[in-house]
Amino acid sequence: HKKSIILYGVKGLERRSTCPKKLRTSKIPLAVTELVLKLRLANPTYGKAKITVLLRRDHAISLSESTVGRIIKNLMVKGKIKRSISCC
């Protein structure tokens, strides 16, 4: 703390940001995320299990249900899709 005061004055006592400097980037290709978005918009009642089956059967893309669920969750957070109307 003493070194901070000497180098930066009173400004050296202020708290510095604790947020990470580098965030991990997603390894899921953007094209796959867009395909999940397209499938979900066409069929709003389809969940992660059904979309996983469609990706594997029709598009030869092998993803786990959990991965598809995370993609759907991220799309909901971004406001690109809404919660399924069949739920609750």
Image (spheres, rainbow, N blue to C red):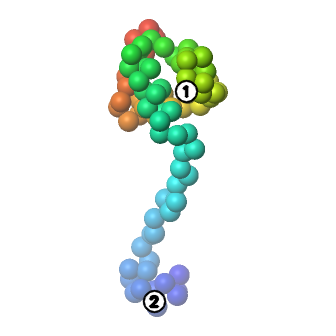
Residue drawn where x is 38% and y is 83% of the image = 10
Mark seen at residue 69:
1
- Residue 48 or residue 56, whichever sits in front: 56
Residue 24 badge? none
Assign a secondary structure to mark 2.
helix
- For disc 2, the marked residue is 7
Please state which amino acid type lies under the numbered disc 2: Leu
The residue depicted at 46 percent of the width and 91 percent of the height is 6
Q: Where's residue 9, x and y in %?
A: 40, 87
Task: Return the residue found at the far bottom.
Answer: 6
Q: Is residue 3 above or below residue 48?
A: below
* 85 sits left or right of 24 in the view: left
Name the foreground residue: 24 vs 33. Answer: 33
Q: In 3D space, how far apart are the residues under numbered discs 1 and 2 (Cα atoms)?
A: 49 Å
- The 10 Å Cα crowd at callout 2, few under 14, some 14 to 19, many 20 or more, is few
At a point 55% along the width and 18% down the height, the residue shown is 58
Q: Amino acid at mark 1?
A: Gly
Query: In the drawing, does residue 56 fall left or right of residue 39?
Result: right
The quarter of the picture where the C terminus appears is top left
**Image vertical order of residue 10 relative to residue 23, above or below:** below
Query: Between 22 and 34, which is closer to the camera in this rendering?
Result: 34
Is residue 71 shown to the viewer in this render? yes
**Can you tell which of label 1 and label 2 is closer to the viewer?**
1
Label 1 close to label 2 by CB (< 8 Å) = no
Instruction: Say which quarter of the image contains residue 54.
Output: top right
Q: Secondary structure at mark 1?
A: helix
